[in-house]
Amino acid sequence: MSTYKEIQGTAVQNVAGDPSNSVEGQLWYNSTTGAFRIKQQDAGGAWATGGQLNTGKMSGAGGGTQTSTLAFAGKDSGFGNLNSVEAYNGSTWTAKNTMNTQRAYMGGVGATNTAVLAIAGGDPGYFGEVESWSGTNWTEVTNVNTARRGLAAAGTQTAAVAMGGQAPGVPGDNSVFTEIWNGSNWTNVNDLNNGRRDLAGSGTSTSALVVGGNPPTNIAESWNGSNWTSISSANASKEKSGAAGSSNTSFLVFGGSPYIAATESWNGSTWTELNDLNVGVQTNTGTGTQGSAISVGGFSSPPSTVGTTATEEWNAPAVVTKTITTT
């Protein structure tokens, strides 16, 4: 069994009390009380209906926060590829300038709806093209080293990681490839332990998590900026899910094939089932954090909507410090 240091890349900190500057997902040992402590979100939370997209879509991508998200490309109700773009301000979607290339099943990252990166994609075909969004226009930047679709991505417009996906010439088409973006170029780094496509991922370029994928699996892996480590599997197998999160210890996954409504969170040690989406959906786009996320579009459950305009917003309770029971 892997140790905490092997999984997270650092040992548990020994503190006389609780640190004043702890962050969500941080674990430490309180030597004063003789207990392990963690800063994490309380159980609970719920999904609420948000503003409707102007154009229904599925298999798209996005970047940003719950109140500042960009949703782009994907497929329409006729399964044709799109290059349409919409920005969300927390209540309303507004159409923006289109992308240069129509595509679906791409990776998307970004801190806000004015600073986003669209990575690879395809279907049909496999694209290596990457486009950067300034808030006004899309600019083609350096391609990924391996063209692919159905990949996951994490990070920001200037510091991202792209992982997995379906690539031609790879046995079963399920790749293990991982690439890092520094704002100018892509660099091949250590591979995933398990090759897969249509996986869900989120976090940063140095602290990310992926889960699920095709064929439907509950396998999860954590990225520390250098290596992938297998962690506890999610409660349910899933593919084509939405995800949100700020690190490899603060992650939310929701929806997925076949028309899943389930939501699960990861706190660095445990997967917890939370309240379901209001409508089961697959190929939905997710952005935001573990405590404040958004699910956009997708292929909703029967009676189905192909390329739904639906938006759902997730809000969880506050982040609190808890004692971990070890007996």
Image (tube, rainbow, N blue to C red):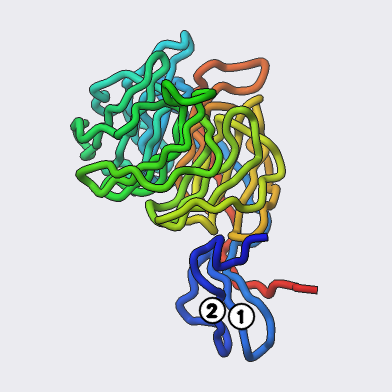
Q: Which residue lies furthest to the right in this view?
A: 327
Q: What residue type is labelled 1?
A: Tyr
Q: How far apart are marks 2 and 1 (CA)?
A: 6 Å
Could you tell me which quadrant the C terminus lies in? bottom right
Could you tell me which quadrant the N terminus lies in? bottom right
- Mark 2 secondary-structure assignment: strand
Q: Residues within 10 Å of mark 1 (few under 14, many from 20)?
A: many
x%, y% of residue 261? 66, 34
- Name the one closer to the observer, 47 or 233: 233
The correct choice, above or below, for 210 with respect to 123 in the image is below
Marks 2 and 1, the one that precedes in the sequence: 2
Residue in view at x 24 percent, y 26 percent: 97
x%, y% of residue 266? 61, 53
The correct choice, above or below, for 150 with respect to 117 in the image is above
Residue in view at x 56 percent, y 65 percent: 319
x%, y% of residue 196? 53, 33
- Name the one closer to the observer, 260 or 113: 260
Residue 5 visible in the picture: yes
Please name the residue that numbered disc 1 is placed on.
29
Residue in view at x 21 percent, y 35 percent: 142
- Name the one closer to the observer, 7 or 141: 7
Mark linked to residue 5: none
The correct choice, above or below, for 319 with respect to 178 in the image is below
Residue in view at x 30 percent, y 34 percent: 145
Please name the residue that numbered disc 2 is placed on.
13
Residue 246 visible in the picture: no
Q: What residue type is labelled 2?
A: Gln
Mark 2 and mark 1 residues within 8 Å of each other at the beta carbon: yes
